[in-house]
Amino acid sequence: MTDPTAVLTEPETPKPAYLVPVSPVPLGVPILRIANDPGLPTLPVTGTWGTDARHVYSKQQPWNADETLIAIENHGTGASPSSLILDGSTYQPKYGPCSSYRRWDYRWHPSRAHAHEQINVTSDGLELMWFDVTSCTKTRSWTLPIPADYGIGSGEGNPSNDGRFVLIAGSTQIYVVDMDPQPPFAPYPNQRIGPPLDVSQCGLADCTIDWAGTSASGKYAVVSHRGDNIRVFDVDPATLVLAPHVMPAGSYRCAGTPDAGYLYSLGHADVAVNSFDNGEDVIVRQDQCHLSGPTVNGVRIGHVLMVRLRDDNIVALTDPTNEAYAHHISTRNLNRPGWAYVDFFQEDGKRFSDEVIAVKLDGSKAVQRFAHKHSVFSGCYRCESHPAPSMDGRRVLFASNWAEHCGASCGSTTDIKDYLIDARAP
């Protein structure tokens, strides 16, 4: 469905059985539960399904670069192993964790040339590595000069879209690693690690790093301080030195200063390149200045906003009129640029209530509406759906306990599983 104005009634839909597709009305897009009931075997991998079997987060891509593998976690009473890699076509378990893999804060490498490798920071924060999860082989390694207490951006950062640059975050310092140096620089194993920058004097009451990451192009570094107050830093391509990116004096923000690189505040934000704006680096997410409705610099502020990193230019991607409140965002659909994937809080009677949708980045407010989430998540972080699209954007994972609008067949609120929306043409 592409009508952004329709208010839909969430259907009473029984909890889907494992690997049995359903196509709930009114949206009709197939949905498949890809994690089995607690206590059942994770065949053909040796192990047992837990009560919490789902992907990590909306901003952490579950699919590998060629979409043949899906990484999920397997937690809860009796769960073993703690992580699984599923077949990207059958969705059945394919690999357990490698015993030699010191996995902690990890991302799939976004390049097809490294489709079986993950980029990982170890739990002691002292090593960055590339690791092939099919052959259980470490392929590249860097000893980090300052412990990466926050890993790859506290779980919410990502490498640049080409997999070359990554921003490492300590408790107060950030620095860039060029993981795949290109001419005129000598190739790996030559190591290019930029000098650390202390961001603890940010000019706000709380300078704690909430998350950090590179921009999609690798041209900028982005730091979100506590309260969703986002700063942009230039990355010197020769030296990897970081410096605040000065914003235009007339740009709008609700915290910080333009000279310190502050943007309009956005929550749960993800970065992308905007294919409708000459590949400019942007960041997309919910309004955290809480101005939904008023007009700022000629833009009527909606719940989902896009901000250009170069100049803090704001674009409203949705209309706030009778709109449910947006929750999480993902732009991990690297092979389908120009769209962002969003889920919304349940607010019956409002547009997009409890839905997973995609919004177009051209400012047209065009949408694609996929499914309802059916999850009760108050007080339960892991019950939040955190929708994450595949690389081509045609499939979406979301987590749910399927305990909302579920008729006579509801899931337990503590049984959290991954569901896959399959929007590919039949």
Image (spheres, helix red, strand yellow):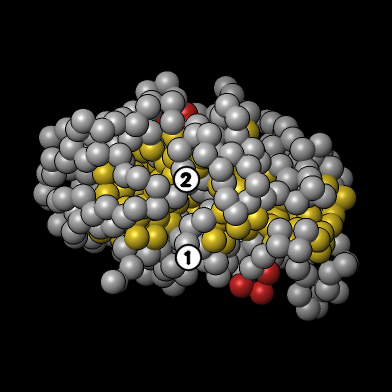
Farthest-out residue, bottom? 183
How packed mark 2 is, by other alpha carbons closer than 10 Å (few <14, some 14-19, many 20 or more), is: many
In the image, taking residue 148 as reference, residue 158 lies left or right, namely left
In the image, taking residue 152 as reference, residue 14 lies left or right, namely left
Residue that appears at 63% across and 42% down = 47
For the N terminus, which image quadrant?
Answer: bottom left
Callout 2: SS:
loop
Distance of label 1 from label 2 (alpha carbons): 14 Å
- The residue carrying mark 2 is 35
Residue that appears at 60% across and 57% down = 94
Residue 368 sits above or below residue 80 on the image: below
Q: Which amino acid does label 1 sit on?
A: Ser
Callout 1: SS:
loop
In the image, taking residue 292 as reference, residue 305 lies left or right, namely right
- The residue carrying mark 1 is 89
Of residue 213 and residue 67, the one placed in the foreground of this image is 67
Residue 393 x/y as whole percent: 40, 63
In the image, taking residue 319 as reference, residue 231 lies left or right, namely right
Residue 388 x/y as whole percent: 45, 51
Q: Are the two marked residues, 1 and 2, in contact with CB atoms closer than 8 angstroms?
A: no
Tell me the quarter of the picture where residue 11 sits.
top left
Residue that appears at 87% across and 50% down = 143
Q: What residue type is labelled 2?
A: Ala
Residue 212 x/y as whole percent: 61, 43
Residue 160 x/y as whole percent: 61, 61
Regarding residue 391, the answer to whether it shows in the image is no
Residue that appears at 54% across and 61% down = 87
For the C terminus, which image quadrant?
Answer: bottom left
Regarding residue 53, the answer to whether it shows in the image is yes
